[in-house]
Image (cartoon, grey):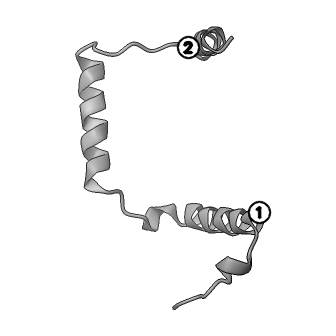
């Protein structure tokens, strides 16, 4: 199936509406979307860093405060 959208004739706002409609549709059928192998590799590496204690987590309020102080 091939749909030809008049992209050259559409405004940016119209294109964003179409993109959002596509994402919403994909989310309704998210089990049909295969996860690439590199996702598994990245998640495994992150889990390993957590297990080894190599990462630090902030609660949401601390993270907000830290970001706000950086952008003052």
The residue lying toward the viewer, choosing from 47 and 19, is: 19
Report the mark closest to the observer, 2 or 1.
1
Where is residue 63? Give x, y as percent.
Answer: 58, 14
Residue displayed at 57% across by 60% down: 27
Do callouts 2 and 1 mark residues in contact (Cβ within 8 Å)? no
Res. 17 image quadrant: bottom right
Q: Secondary structure at mark 2?
A: loop
- The alpha-carbon separation of the residues under discs 2 and 1 comes to 35 Å
Residue displayed at 43% across by 64% down: 33
**Where does label 2 land, which residue?**
59
Residue displayed at 60% across by 15% down: 67
Where is residue 56? Give x, y as percent.
Answer: 39, 12
Q: Residues within 10 Å of mark 1 (few under 14, many from 20)?
A: few
Q: Is residue 60 above or below residue 3?
A: above
Q: Secondary structure at mark 1?
A: helix
Q: Is residue 15 left or right of residue 50?
A: right
- Find residue 52 and name its label: none
Q: Is residue 20 above or below residue 1?
A: above
Q: Is residue 22 above or below residue 57?
A: below
Res. 9 image quadrant: bottom right
**Where does label 1 land, which residue?**
13
The residue lying toward the viewer, choosing from 19 and 51, is: 19
């Amino acid at each position: 199936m091939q749909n030809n959208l008049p992209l050259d004739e559409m405004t940016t706002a119209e294109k964003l509406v179409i993109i959002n409609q596509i994402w919403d549709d994909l989310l309704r059928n998210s089990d049909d979307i295969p996860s690439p192998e590199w996702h598994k590799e990245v998640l495994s590496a992150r889990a390993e860093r957590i297990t080894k204690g190599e990462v630090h987590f902030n609660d949401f309020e601390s993270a907000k405060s830290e970001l706000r102080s950086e952008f003052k």
